[in-house]
Image (tube, grey):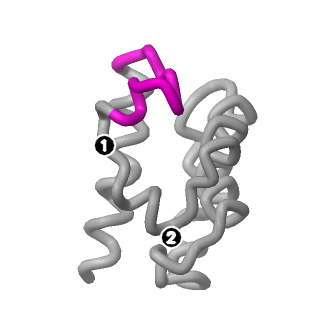
Amino acid sequence: IEVAQMLADKPLIEKWNSTDVSEWIQKCKLVANIDDLSSIFEANKVDGQALLGLNEEELKGDGYKIESLGRRKKIMRAINFLKASKCR
């Protein structure tokens, strides 16, 4: 429900800044240690455009170093949900 409200308030994901992306991460509750994930995305200056362009290989790579397959899959599912929402 929180994510749906965020999308209603800020529907243009490509215009999100890194603070919006951090807020999205918090609301999605993607992983147990959300602050670590927010920090990783902030360090990589992930805004809305970058978020929509991320892929699983990049999440595993040097910039993100998200080793857990399960964690990467959860993140990609959430990103794909955003992409699908954008098309509606």
User: How many circles with numbers are drawn on the protein?
Assistant: 2
Residue shown at 53% from the left, 38% from the top = 30
User: Where's residue 53, x and y in %?
Assistant: 34, 57
Tell me, yes or no, whether the highlighted magenta stretch contains residue 63: yes
Mark earlier in primary sequence (1, 2)? 2
Q: Quadrant of residue 67?
A: top left
Q: 15 above or below 18?
A: below
Q: Which mark is residue 55?
A: 1
Residue shown at 64% from the left, 36% from the top = 40
Q: Nearer the viewer, mark 1 or mark 2?
A: 1
Q: 86 above or below 64?
A: below
Element marked by disc 2: helix
Q: Which residue is mark 2?
A: 4
Q: Which amino acid does the dot numbered 2 rest on?
A: Ala
Around disc 1, counting alpha carbons within 10 Å, would you say few (fewer than 14), some (14 to 19), or many (20 or more)?
some
Q: Quadrant of residue 59?
A: top left
Q: Which amino acid does the dot numbered 1 rest on?
A: Asn
Residue shown at 48% from the left, 23% from the top = 66
Q: 23 above or below 84?
A: above
Q: Which residues are magenta?
A: 58-69
Q: Is residue 70 left or right of residue 25?
A: left
| Distance in Å between CA atoms under marks 1 and 2 | 22 Å
User: Where's residue 78, x and y in %?
Assistant: 40, 49
Q: Which mark is residue 63?
A: none
